[in-house]
Image (cartoon, rainbow, N blue to C red):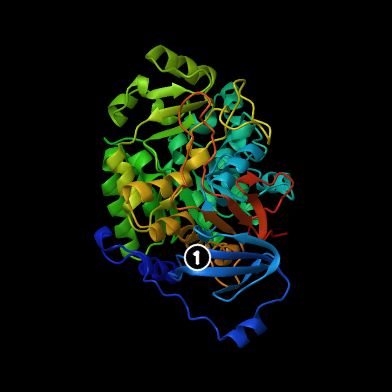
Amino acid sequence: MTRYWTALATLCVGSIAACQPAAKQPAPDTPPAKAEAAIPEDLDLVILNGRVMDPESGLDDIRNIGVKDGVIQTITSADLSGAKTIDASGHVVAPGFIDYHLHGQDPFAVRLGLRDGVTSQLDLEGGAYPVEDYYDAREGKTRNNYGVSVSHAWARISVMDGIDPKGLGFYTGAINAATHTGAKWNLKRADPEHIARIQAELKDGLDKGALGIGVPIGYYTAASSPELNAVASVARDSNSFLTTHVRYMAQIPPSGYLGLQEILSLAAVYDLPLLVHHVPSNCLGLTVDCLDLIDEARAKGMKVVGEFYPYIYGSSVIGADYLGPGFRERTGMDYSDIIYNKTGERMTEALLKKYRAEDPGGDMLLFHIKKPQMLAAFQRPGVFQGSDGMPFRLADGSIPDPDAEFGGPVGHPRGAGARARILRMVREDKVISLMEALAKLSYLQASFLEDMVPQMKLRGRLKPGAIADITIFDPETVADTGEWAEGKYSLPSTGIPYVIVNGVVAVSDSKVQMDVYAGQPIRNEVKD
């Protein structure tokens, strides 16, 4: 825990006005004779002449990188040669981007993620259940790294509604199927027998290698506080952590601020690390207050981090609790601020009632965040990026083929361009420094998780011995191109010509290598 906050302090000290990238401190090169002896002669990959930026050390200088067996062997000014060479002149060479909040986990979504520089595409908020189904389905078949939490939500659907989410419930229609059993998972309190069974399923998920417990309580606010206590006790007993979409997307009581207080109290009582997803999305006009509360918790020694995405509109399922009666008063939105993705219709009172009853698991878009709220989270030290990217879908609701044409499949553009959008905003709007942005895209994520997930100790940074997950981009041209318009929803980012996953080139000259499956599971030890 101490290591994380020490690392954060190297990036930011005091207020945001004083938050600057770590001082430029390239380590002196080893004397040539010694360096030659230390560098393998048969490097698999060398990256030459790039501006190497490492948020952990503060290195920001022109360097060459040598990779062998998926591991960075050297970062040096000395000449290097290898089996494959990438000339990164004029480009930034950065740690591969890590996203802990990507619900899009199918091959098409992964392809878009790679074009956006994502080397580790995880879902810690929604999570999976059963966990082994998720990992088994992806073994040897994924182009970037993958991993999940065990999902409290999907475990609830299984226990209370008798429906098997088969790993990722977003892909199996589990939410809609639950309507036929009364949707107990999001409308009912769990009785003591249900709570005991849910606890057992969460414990089993952690034993099967889940990274933590995902608690998106905002989608089932009927769940009792004692049930959340029971969930927290499972995390404590397994030395794990919680991630959460807090209760109440509202800026009047009961508010997102109150929801944050609830989950912070659990983390404090049970001494748990906590990741709070998309703070502006729930706190709305109280975003700065919520960020201040997270900072206060950290100042008291809690390991808690917030997350944001760089958009003023979000996306989820139309049956979400927070769109129930009274949502306009709670959120400041109107019906027309909600779009039903399948038809592109803006809601009316009648349409919203219809689709919430007939297709509660259907995707929707909502305009609910104000730009100052988003920027407040963007600029706050220690708050990192999580895109919340949903699966993209065709007109009939199905998932696109892996090699489907970009643009047409419908969904929130954040699933395609959130990372490039951050880099573009850094260039055009000077929101934060480039080094701070890279920390929010990679290093801070790895640092938060590394005490609970040892694999992350060697990701999110560029140094000898680190896993060679690397993103190479042009700081002058990198940009998101997706937008909420027909034929443009799922357009890929530009200006990110190379992405390396575990030492293997997964994107070359801005083309995803469709025959390369270099992704590895990010997973804790599986217990017998």
Q: Which residue matches tag 1? A: 52
Query: What kind of residue is marked 1?
Result: Val
Q: Residues within 10 Å of mark 1 (few under 14, many from 20)?
A: many
Q: Vertically, is 96 above or below 31?
A: above
Q: Vertically, is 380 above or below 256?
A: below
Could one spot residue 333 in this view of the protein?
Answer: yes
Q: Quadrant of the C terminus?
A: bottom right
The image shows residue 454 at horizontal and vertical percentages of: 59, 65
Q: Helix or strand or loop: what does disc 1 sit on?
A: strand
In terms of image quadrants, where is residue 169? top right
Could one spot residue 388 in this view of the protein?
Answer: no
The image shows residue 70 at horizontal and vertical percentages of: 67, 64
Q: Vertically, is 331 above or below 200?
A: above
Q: Quadrant of the N terminus?
A: bottom left
294 lies left or right of 527? left
Count of numbered circles in the view = 1
- Toward the viewer: 406 or 170? 406
- Toward the viewer: 271 or 438? 438
